[in-house]
Image (cartoon, rainbow, N blue to C red):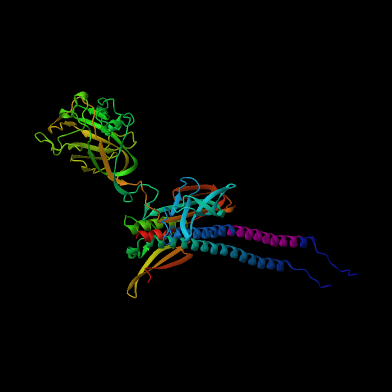
Amino acid sequence: MHRNQKGMSLVEIMVAIVVSTIVISAAYASYSIISKNYEFQKDLKYMSQTARAVVKMIARDVRMAGYTEFNKQQIKEAVKITDSSGTCCDRIDIVYDKSSSERIKISYYTQQYNNRYRLMKKTDKCTNSDCSSTSTLQSAQPIADYVEDFQFVGTNSGCPTDGTPKAGCGTYKWVSPKPWDYEPEKYPSLFHPQEENRRNADCNQQSGMVDGDINTYGGCRIQSGYYDAGIYGFQLDKPMMVSKIRMGSTGTWGSNYGHDPKYTSKSHIGLTTCGGISNGKKLVHPYGLHHPFSFQFSIEAVNDKPSCHRCRYAYPYSSGCIHGDFPMEQPTNNIAHVLTDRFVLRAYNNKVINYHNGDYRNITGSNTSEISEIEVYGESYDTPPPIIEVEIGLLLRSPNEHQTKSKSFSINMGNRSFASNDRYMRDSFSTSVIVRNLYYASH
Amino acid sequence: MKNQSGVSLLEAMIAAAVIGIGFMAIYTLAITSTSILMNTIDREKGNMIANTVFEDLITDTPNLLSYHNMDFKTVGQGSASHIAKKSKWAQIASKRFGSPQTKDKRQIQVVKKSVAGKDIFIVTIDLATRGGRAKNQFKRVFNAP
């Protein structure tokens, strides 16, 4: 036997253990770091790969939108964006002809799955030419997971295509406003303080003045001692930029001075000394259906700010005289380029005309006017242009949590603002596409 | 077996240090690969943004030369169509890449050339992100014969 065989001393063993522990823990630490890094990279790559695939796929379909095969009926709505406003997420429907016998509609939208959203793709075959009825060609399938936001912005040469008003993007036309039965209590600033207790009680019966019948009446009338003014409310179905106004009257007139003896307290239209009609001047025949008249007025767009007393800056204001046959026009200087869906017409120093001899006189004690023809001209946004440019935005989150601490994240995509505070990573992607078939058709 | 000797402490420490250098290299590898991945993602996003720019330019081809030397790091002042587009791109780029750092580049060059009697425009977009670490260039020819 080897008598001199020596073991290791305790110290040696301890040192060996310490050294190997250091090496092994370093190895473990690096394993864990590499593994975490791998997971991190995997999720980063997941987001960018998904985004690339999805965005390219949608962009390709948008580019095809509106393609019409020879001799086929025009596609009615090649790109349709359904806005989700503040929630997840928008939807897009794209229609084009795949072949001479097949018109298809491709839809991209999100669907909730567990606690997250998935992006779905669905292809339908149109069974009629405007694609209002369809049959399934390819049922809905998820093409991306962990979708946080999916937004589209459709424009036409920079103009909104959803009817959102923007100066320069609408179409100009004449629109008939409807009477607006405003409650004077809600709009005290429309009146001077001294007018408030001098107005009549009929302020919220506006409809009577535009029905062509002087039997019915409406509108506030102010007798302040300085002037007589009628304050008539009008509203538009959709906001527009009013740039001109025209008025006329087709009312059935009574005898002298526009008064039918039967309706002695009712006059029909506000007349004034402004413009062509003054003392000694008479109106010109024919008075007929479209009576010539002269009218001094101001027009004020109304907003709901309660604080201001007819503030001319907040309530854009325009005044002028109009006279002549309908249609007669008057530009509304300052009211143009202000979006409005309600306005008041304030007519000063109302006078009535005798349409038999063209004479006129002041109204005293009467409280009505008939303005049966009133139209405003301006930029209207009720027929939005078709979508030509599409901006695609996609916000994805990582499948797994990565950050060691919660981190706040916020982004505005399309018309939605997204905010979160958690440990997931998020990344956003966007691109734009022109709908070639529609763009080159219109240029 | 009498002269059998163990590993000396010094030798063990040296070995550990050498292994440590190896581990450092592995960490560097991990960090570098993440950085490269980030560059790749920025290239992907840059590609999408360049597409946005090119598509927007299609709608304004008569004024292509007004985009020459345009730097869309910041939004523009004014209502001219090319300024409005610059502002739009600046906002998009800042959302995708963050606000521009010192060595970042977001620039458009437009060169006009005459080929076979026809004017063509070569549009180049230079995008440098992550402090100049991720550099990408995108080109498209407009009005090509």
Give whichever of A318, A359 is nearer the camera.
A359
Residue located farthest toward the right when viewing the structure as drawn: A1
Q: Horizontal placement of A90 versus A21: left or right?
A: left
Residue drawn where x is 32% and y is 44% of the image: A240
Residue A14 picture location, percent across and down: 76, 60
Q: Horizontal placement of A400 versus A443: left or right?
A: right
Residue located farthest toward the left when viewing the structure as drawn: A280
Give whichever of A188, B129 is nearer the camera.
A188
Write down the region rendered in magenta. Answer: A14-41
Residue B123 picture location, percent across and down: 39, 67
Magenta-colored segment: predominant secondary structure: helix
Residue B52 picture location, percent across and down: 43, 60
Is residue B71 shown to the viewer in this render? no
Magenta-colored stretch includes residue A145: no
Give whichever of B85, A118 is nearer the camera.
A118
Locate residue B69: give its quadrant. Answer: bottom left
In the depicted structure, whether residue A328 falls above or below residue A206: below
Quadrant of the image for the C terminus of chain A? bottom left
Give whichever of A426, A53 is nearer the camera.
A53
Residue drawn where x is 64% and y is 59% of the image: A35
Is residue B118 shown to the viewer in this render? yes
In the depicted structure, whether residue A308 falls above or below residue A98: above
Magenta-colored stretch includes residue A20: yes
Residue located farthest toward the bottom when viewing the structure as drawn: B116
| Numbered label tally | 0
Locate residue B49: give its quadrant. Answer: bottom left
In the depicted structure, whether residue A416 falls above or below residue B82: above
Residue B141 picture location, percent across and down: 40, 69
Quadrant of the image for the N terminus of chain A? bottom right
Q: Horizontal placement of B16 versus A437: left or right?
A: right
